[in-house]
Image (spheres, rainbow, N blue to C red):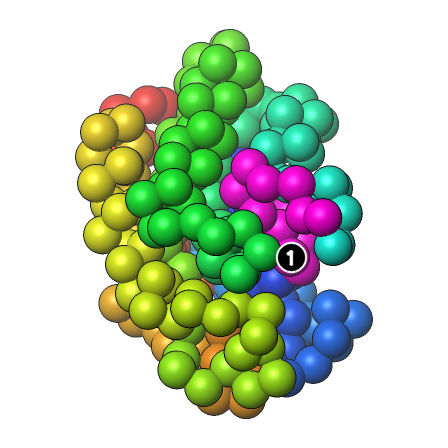
């Protein structure tokens, strides 16, 4: 059995658009659950999603525990050995309080990739496969979240390119979630159940094409 860790924010946690972090889709509806169903019994899918999680930034409002880098290393050690780690973060880094351009958000993702490679939590102490997933762009209308994410909408459309460039330079896998899903208009930055399903199916296809027979 191979193990994949899905490390992300509220769109991995399964927060319902327009709801609170406690309003959550069920396991079979969330994209990691869909991924598990599509990959089948030879895969163990671990879900690590946290609402508000950033890549490497301490949040002065929501707390330092929202910094993904602080939790990544103990998370990897808890679940090791891991064959694949899928990272889908970046949206929360675009909050106005951080004042970060898309290129800096990508560099935050790069820090997480560096940490994974340094720890090498794969089978036999090797570096596992790593896949960076760019979150779907935010909609222009993000309702009452406009002040918190002021200016983020335009930046969010540039994340995929920056992430792809980073993934290429670090020789890891890349997938643009925006190529198959959109954010729900209810709040403009969360994905609905239909999008979770489409993303889970698409990522399963990406995982299969990595060529695991070469690593057996």
Q: In the rendered view, would you say 59 is above or below 139?
A: above
Q: Which residues are magenta?
A: 41-60
Q: In the rendered view, would you say 197 is above or below 174?
A: below
Q: Is residue 52 magenta?
A: yes
Q: Could you tell whether 60 is left or right of 196 in the image?
A: right
Q: How many marks?
A: 1
Q: Could you tell whether 60 is left or right of 154 in the image?
A: right
What residue is at 66 percent from the left and 41 percent from the top?
Answer: 58
Is disc 1 surrounded by few (<14), some (14 to 19) or many (20+) residues within 10 Å?
many
Chief secondary structure of the magenta span?
loop
Q: In the rendered view, would you say 105 is above or below 176?
A: above
Where residue 119 appears, as percent x and y from the top left, is: 54, 15
Q: In the rendered view, would you say 150 is above or below 9?
A: below
What residue is at 22 percent from the left and 52 percent from the top?
Answer: 161
Dividing the picture into quadrants, the one containing residue 81 is: top right
Q: Nearer the viewer, residue 141 or 44?
A: 141
Where residue 103 appears, as percent x and y from the top left, is: 32, 44
Q: Could you tell whether 131 is left or right of 60 in the image?
A: left
* Image quadrant in which the C terminus is located: top left
| Residue corresponding to mark 1 | 52
Q: Is residue 147 magenta?
A: no
What residue is at 69 percent from the left and 81 percent from the top?
Answer: 19
What residue is at 49 percent from the left and 24 percent from the top?
Answer: 116
Is residue 32 visible to the viewer in this orientation of the structure? no
């Amino acid at each position: 059995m191979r193990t994949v860790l899905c490390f992300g924010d509220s769109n991995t946690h399964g927060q319902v658009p327009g709801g609170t972090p406690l309003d959550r889709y069920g396991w079979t509806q969330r994209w990691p659950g869909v991924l598990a169903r599509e990959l089948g019994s030879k895969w163990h899918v671990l879900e690590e999603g946290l609402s508000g999680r950033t890549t490497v930034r301490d949040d002065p409002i929501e707390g330092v525990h929202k910094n993904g880098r602080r939790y990544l290393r103990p998370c990897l050690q808890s679940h090791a050995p891991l064959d694949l780690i899928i990272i889908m973060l970046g949206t929360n880094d675009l909050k106005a309080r951080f004042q970060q351009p898309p290129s800096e958000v990508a560099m935050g993702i790069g820090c997480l990739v560096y940490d994974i490679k340094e720890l090498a939590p794969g089978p036999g102490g090797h570096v596992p496969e790593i896949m960076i997933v760019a979150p779907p762009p935010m909609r222009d209308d993000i309702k009452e979240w406009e002040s918190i994410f002021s200016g983020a909408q335009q930046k969010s459309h540039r994340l995929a390119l920056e992430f792809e460039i980073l993934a290429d330079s670090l020789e890891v896998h890349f997938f643009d979630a925006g190529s198959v899903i959109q954010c729900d208009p209810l709040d403009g930055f969360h994905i609905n159940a239909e999008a979770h399903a489409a993303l889970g199916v698409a990522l399963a296809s990406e995982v299969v094409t990595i060529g695991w027979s070469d690593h057996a």
